[in-house]
Amino acid sequence: MRCRTSVTRHFLVVAAASLAASCVSLTDDHGGSATVNVPVVGQTAQALGFSVQARGFSFEQRYGSPTQGDSLALGLAVVGYTGGSALIEVTDSSGTMRLQQTVTTSLAQGSTVIHGRPPYQVHLLFDAFSGAFTLAVAAQS
């Protein structure tokens, strides 16, 4: 059952990331601009969710989540990319870099599993990034 739970959680992370990214638009229904450059963040001891509709977005933040789990499922979706970069880094409690990825293109759906020792730290760095970016990170046992 443990394997099934991990696979299910991994699937849910990827599905949530791709769904959230596919629902964003840089224009509203009335032809004006939608809210941009305002990240939406959800954080618990077991998960982190981050989403932003960006236009020339520069931002840096470290999140001390998830604090549990032998491994992490990470899902990422980027749509409507038009420029800039987004750096994602994940370190574990020993300070070991477990993931380092720079995003410079649209990505319909990407996922990976990261192994390490909790608590984890997720570092996000955006440099003049434009596009819809959604990241979901969930602890696995």
Image: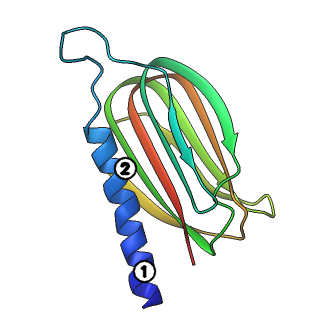
The residue lying at 61 percent from left, 33 percent from top is: 125
**Residue 139 appears in view:** yes
Instruction: Say left or right for 113 vs 33.
Output: right
Amino acid residing under circle 2? Ala
Q: Quadrant of the N terminus?
A: bottom left
Name the disc covering residue 5, or none: 1
Residue 23: image x %, image y %?
Answer: 26, 37
Q: Quadrant of residue 52?
A: top left
Residue 53: image x %, image y %?
Answer: 40, 26
Q: Distance from label 2 to label 1 (Cα)?
A: 18 Å
Name the disc covering residue 17, or none: 2
Instruction: Say left or right for 90 vs 101.
Output: right
Residue 14: image x %, image y %?
Answer: 36, 58
Amino acid residing under circle 1? Thr
Instruction: Say which element carries label 1.
Output: helix
Q: Earlier in the sequence, mark 2 or mark 1?
A: 1
